[in-house]
Image (cartoon, coloured by chain):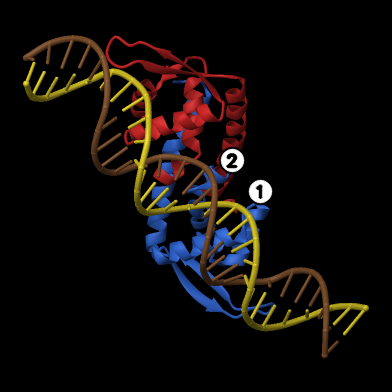
Chain colours: A blue, B red, C yellow, D brown
Amino acid sequence: MTEMLKGTLEGIVLALLTGSPAYGYEITTLLRAQGFTEIAEGTVYALLVRIEQKGLVDVEKRPSEKGPPRKVYTLNARGEKELDEFWNTWSFLSERLEQLRKGGK
Amino acid sequence: MTEMLKGTLEGIVLALLTGSPAYGYEITTLLRAQGFTEIAEGTVYALLVRIEQKGLVDVEKRPSEKGPPRKVYTLNARGEKELDEFWNTWSFLSERLEQLRKGGK
DNA sequence: TCTACTACTTAGCGTTACTATGTACTAGTA
DNA sequence: TACTAGTACATAGTAACGCTAAGTAGTAGA
């Protein structure tokens, strides 16, 4: 699983951010709720740093009632474009794999 | 693309080997014919070394009319089991992704 | 002889997810 | 007060894997 997540996890997080901004801890729990139970916290935070440095998201710091301030991530135009490309790549791969599964060499 | 291939490429190659054995050069051209045009030769050979060391394939050396001897790889029982697990992981990931694409958080 | 195609090998690199650990803030409780 | 648990983020080090680049070796045809 770990290896298969490489590359796709970024797309998954970008997809999670479409429509509604979110912060790291929230994203981690979201992922776990969706079945990615073994995602490490550190993995998510490192990924968020990466997509921020690539300029795919805008970041805003907001106070929390329950702990340290949150870093809220919002998908921006660059991020949407990147997500588009992700879906293209995914579609290509997905189609190839489905063909292979059916035995179509 | 490169990152998304990590982990899946091994599954793709194992899938290609089901039913009919093949050798490295052949696998490379097969992959390219299927749209993976940018797969590097070195990548394939390195992967073959790996799956051989993991014991997922049996290897036999056969002379070629057109060049150096070929190393023909055949999927064995271990390999089939691994391929099964690959399809399970793939299915899980694929379903999650399709849900996300539809906007289902 | 030179080129092109076939066929395999390997050293070094970059990216990414994981492990492990640490910091910091709040609230509840013994 | 001290302790625990939940919330929230950060980071140093590691392993896996695909890519780049370069090489070796065999055959055939110009």
User: What secondary structure is marked by label 2?
Assistant: helix
Whether residue A77 is visible here, answered yes or no, is: yes
Q: Chain of mark 1?
A: A
Q: Quadrant of residue A88?
A: top left
**Callout 2 crowding tier (Cα within 10 Å): few <14, some 14–19, many ≥20:** few
The answer to whether residue C7 is above or below residue C16 is above
Q: Amino acid at mark 2?
A: Glu
Q: Position of residue D12 (x, y in %)?
A: 51, 66
Residue name at image x 50 percent, y 75 percent: A60
Mark 2 chain: B
At 42% across and 65% down in the image, what residue appears? A76
Per the image, the residue denoted by label 1 is A35
The spot of residue A98 in percent (x, y) is 50, 29
Q: Which mark is residue B95?
A: 2
Q: Nearer the viewer, residue B65 or B26?
A: B65
Determine whether D9 is above or below A28 in the image: below
